[in-house]
Image (tube, helix red, strand yellow):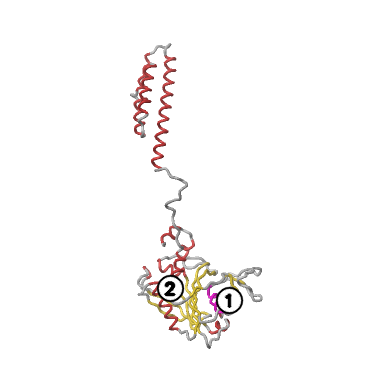
Amino acid sequence: MQDQLDRALSEAEAAAGAVRTRAELEALKARLVGPNGSLTAVTKVMGTLSKEERPAAGKLLNAAKARAEALLAGLLSKVEEAELAAALGPEVDPTLPSPDAPAGVLHPLTRTRERVLATFRKLGFVVAEGPEVETEWHCFDALNTPADHPARDMQDTLYLPASFRSADAPRKGEEALLLRTHTSSVQVRTMLGRKPPLRIVAPGRCFRRDAVDATHSANFHQVEGLWVDRSVTLADLRGVLDFFVKETFGPDAETRLRPSFFPFTEPSFEMDIRSPDLGRLSGRWLEILGCGLVDPKVLEACGLDPAEWSGLAFGLGLERIAMLQHGIDDIRHFYANDLRFLRQLA
């Protein structure tokens, strides 16, 4: 029996060197310990042995089985390592830089802002900026907004605590500080700090106590425009905005002005556009911005003589422009940080 066991195991060990795959391992296992395997055939001899011979034969058989199990376990480990290596692919040097690091993209609102600013730069406008924390005077009083105007109510404007201080917005007396509700305050700061003629566009973030829904956000972005010079007229306003609309929405886009009211412009208008290239909104008149000629009281508040200077002003929402350009129906997508949405518009 010893010779038979040694022969079966020697044959299995010799064949083990050629095993590379799981199928080859299973074939060797069947030849060794399967129903018709060489080691199984030796086991069947136990039935022919006498009672005295069986203990010694059983001991030899158990030792052979342990040797066979160790052989098969070693081969299984070898095969599994080979399968894992094949799945992982070639060995990687971890000290090398990643060849496929994803590149970042600009946020859709950032790209929209840069396109809008580039359009107005073609007309000689320069970018001006101001603080997000503003005084009541810059945000309301200088813009001819009366003290009882609804926009100044606490349910519309985010006021800061009386103890709050800002180096960019020093108070005049007891006036309140607030988060600016529009970037028109940058127009005031520009007229106070520079002499006309001037043309500026003021992009920036604004804040209002709006209930958040598909078309409203408490945090949004505007671009305000201001042109102050001698003899600025409605024709100049219409020309600037027509140029902007055609650059943004295509040469077939149309515009119209509807009379409206803003405290800081007189006359005041809402501008609508109609374009054949706006998807499901094509062919419909859509409101996109407010505009008008600068009210003489605003010029006076900024130290300019209305008899000498006149101006035009307009304000547009970046989210509104981006939503129309890309067919977006919910403003909340811009602030959800969903990479699928952000990369889709890249």
* Nearer to us in this view, 222 or 243: 243
Amino acid on which disc 2 is placed: Thr
Disc sitting over residue 138 in the figure: 1
SS of the residue under disc 2: helix
Q: How much space separates mark 2 and mark 1, taking CA atoms?
A: 27 Å
* Nearer to us in this view, 215 or 108: 108
SS of the residue under disc 1: helix
Task: Find out whether residue 169 is within the magenta segment.
Answer: no
Label 2 vs 1, first from the N-terminus = 2
Residue 62: which quarter of the image?
top left
Which residues fall within the magenta stretch? Answer: 182-192
**Is residue 306 placed above or below 24 in the rendered structure?**
below
**Is residue 84 placed above or below 217 in the rendered structure?**
above
**Is residue 265 placed above or below 69 in the rendered structure?**
below
Q: Quadrant of the C terminus?
A: bottom left
Q: Position of residue 192 (x, y in %)?
A: 57, 79
Dominant secondary structure (helix, strand or loop) of the stretch shown in magenta = helix
Residue 167: which quarter of the image?
bottom right
Q: Position of residue 341 (x, y in %)?
A: 43, 60
Outermost residue on the bottom side: it is 307
Q: Position of residue 1 (x, y in %)?
A: 38, 16
Residue 46: which quarter of the image?
top left
* Nearer to us in this view, 177 or 169: 169
Crowdedness near tag 1: few (<14), some (14–19) or many (≥20) residues, C-alpha within 10 Å: many
* Nearer to us in this view, 43 or 133: 133
Q: Identify the residue at horizontal 35%, vertical 20% (top origin).
A: 41
Identify residue for label 2.
Answer: 119
- Confirm whether residue 244 shows in the render: yes
Judged by depth in the image, the label closer to the viewer, 2 or 1, is 2
Crowdedness near tag 2: few (<14), some (14–19) or many (≥20) residues, C-alpha within 10 Å: some
